[in-house]
Image: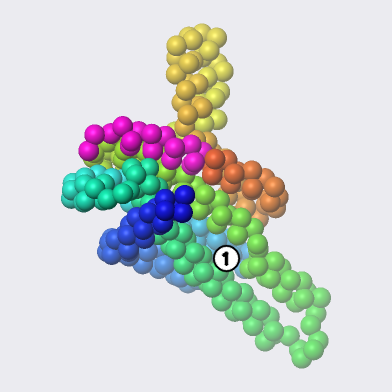
Amino acid sequence: MKGSLLRIQAVAWSTLMEALRQKVLWVLALFAVIMIASSIYFADFTFEREFKFIKDVGSASISVLGLLTAMIGAAQLIPTEIERRTIYTTMSKPVFRFEFLLGKYFGLLSLITLMVLGMSVIFFGVVLVHEQIYVAEITAGAAAADWSPEQVRMVEDILEQSRDFGMVQAILLLWARLALVESIALLLSTVATSSIFIIFASVVIYIIGHLQSVAREAWAEVMTENWMLGAFSAVIAWLVPNFQSFSIIDEILAGETISWAYVSQIFSYSVFYTLIVLLASGLIFEEREL
């Protein structure tokens, strides 16, 4: 077991280092950082709406960059290795195919995690800067040691908006969704050779996953009329992950209080589904002719 973990770690480290050398990822990261940092200049509303705007821009930047990295990166993991013929060098060493696959997955996931953490730090930094600006404005307008109840209430509201720990929940769910998307793209890369097809198929599955509620309703209606079409709808509804459950992120950003128990339930669902997809990927990759 120890030797297997070391081999997975070696492949993951190599994948992470190779991914960090891809300039396109740094361009995307720079774009996302600019979006987050510039949000402080784009909003000229009340502090409630401004904080909401910053949260929306920050989460959208993390989500978009993460999805691009997960889909594009995972789509190139196996096809690129085969195209460069470097996979044969790796497979000639005492490395099992499933270890190689897991190493590739965790290497790219490490990159995604670093990107999410880095962008989150910048995001929270922008929020705290905003907080200090608003508090300083209120402090400047208050008499020394003589704050009015209205000013005290405004400061409390500002701190409540800027130190909203619900954003931690949102970022955790964003990361879980990205890990799941990456596993799906990796599964597709074990059966396809075209990176473009893998990216396209990943996008289609992602969209279908957001239409799960529609698919389940269609299944319930169609089963009584056409069992074959109903069976097909059932397969789609149960095999494709329910990305609609991650819509709770929008509720968190809107200021809704969501219990950690419910967040943990969605997070656990994502981890469980990811493990199933990785297991399926390993089984398919073991049988694939290279």
> On the rendered structure, is 53 left or right of 86?
right
Residue for point 62% across, 52% down = 252
* Residue 10: x %, y % from top left: 36, 58
> On the rendered structure, is 102 left or right of 193?
right
Main SS of the magenta part reads helix
Q: Is residue 122 visible?
A: yes
Q: Is residue 16 visible?
A: no
Q: In the rendered view, would you say 140 is above or below 199?
A: below
> On the rendered structure, is 252 left or right of 54?
right
* Residue 247: x %, y % from top left: 56, 44
> On the rendered structure, is 177 left or right of 188?
right
Q: Quadrant of the C terminus?
A: top left
* Residue 262: x %, y % from top left: 67, 45
Q: Secondary structure at mark 1?
A: helix
10 or 147, which lies in front?
10
Q: Quarter-wise, where is residue 23 in the image? A: bottom left
Q: Is residue 283 magenta?
A: yes
Query: Which residue sits furthest left?
Result: 84
Residue for point 54% across, 25% down = 216
Mark 1: give few (<14), some (14-19) or many (20+) Cα within 10 Å.
some
* Residue range of the region highlighted in magenta in the rendering: 273-290
